Amino acid sequence: MQAAFAVLTAGLLLFHRAVPDSVGRLGSLLEAFLPWLGLVIPVLLVLALVRRSATALVALLLPVAAWTHLFGGLLLPAGRPGPHDLLVVQHNVGDTNTDPAGTARALAGAGADLVALEELVPPARSVYERTLAPDYPYHAVRGTVGLWSRHPIGDARALDIRPRGIAGPWSRGLRAVVRTPHGEIAAYVAHLPSVRMRASGFASSLRDESAGLLGEAVAAEELTSRMNVAERGFALSFPAAFPMARIDQVMARSATVADLRTLPETGSDHLPVAARITL
């Protein structure tokens, strides 16, 4: 039995994209918490040792190899910053955050080149603008997302990533050109719809549709080649009190996200994440 569970765990890790979303969107739910599937491994190890099953121990090598292949590299230490690196901070500041000024000061203290914020709502928006201004003289806000930069920003515009199922005012996308010392880069800030656990299963269709619209916009970008995620760091960022999901991301095209890490907790229900981008 342990051997069968070991093979099943390895199969889910390696072929998670094959799990269908037709019933309760189980595939999306699995992918949201995929790293935690590794917790099955020590449980199976203990059972195999108790039963003294050589077959189960050998079978256990399969999920160990699968988990290491997918996530082992994220545990390696980050490399040294290079001369063409940018530090980027991304944070869902939370629309119920009671300390926007403290949050802004904490983000500025990270020393990033770019700061991307989501869930900017009045009157907190003006607090972020005022508090970040000394360190970030350039910024652009569209709807509830914004970008602050140490370098000049141009051609800032709203990015339409609203799914068809959402009616009324809804602006959660921004695209801007940042003129860095290493050349111009296109920067996107996007806040996708939240997922929900319901009686019918994992509700992620709106988020999936919005992600598709964002992907189409990035694919058409002239200033960018291929989306890359972080090479180092898990950066589990939600919920802030006990992070279990890696839902706050920094990605890049024609560049490398060398490492991703979380920053200390703020007044938000998300943790900030910081990424080093190698151009």
Image: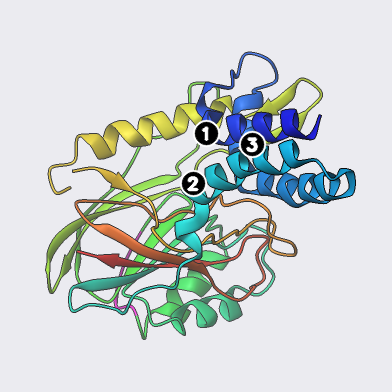
At 43% from the left and 34% from the top, the residue drawn is: 211
| Residue that carries the numbered disc 2 in the rendered image | 70
Chain part drawn in magenta: 136-140
Spatial distance from mark 3 to mark 2, Cα to Cα? 24 Å
Crowd band around label 3 with a 10 angstrom C-alpha radius: few (<14), some (14–19), many (20+): some
Image marks 1 and 2: residues in contact by CB distance under 8 Å: yes
- Residue type, numbered disc 3: Val
Magenta stretch: dominant secondary structure: strand
- Residue type, numbered disc 1: Leu
Residue 134 vs residue 246, the one in the foreground: 246
x, y percent for residue 83: 18, 79
Q: Quadrant of the C terminus?
A: bottom left
Residue 77 shows in this picture: yes
- Residue type, numbered disc 2: Leu
At 29% from the left and 65% from the top, the residue drawn is: 277
- Circle 2 — which element? helix
Spatial distance from mark 1 to mark 3, Cα to Cα? 24 Å
Residue 151 vs residue 37, the one in the foreground: 37
**Among the two numbered marks 3 and 2 on one chain, the one whose residue lies closer to the N terminus:** 2
Q: Which mark is residue 195?
A: 3
- Circle 1 — which element? helix
Residue 133 vs residue 214, the one in the foreground: 214
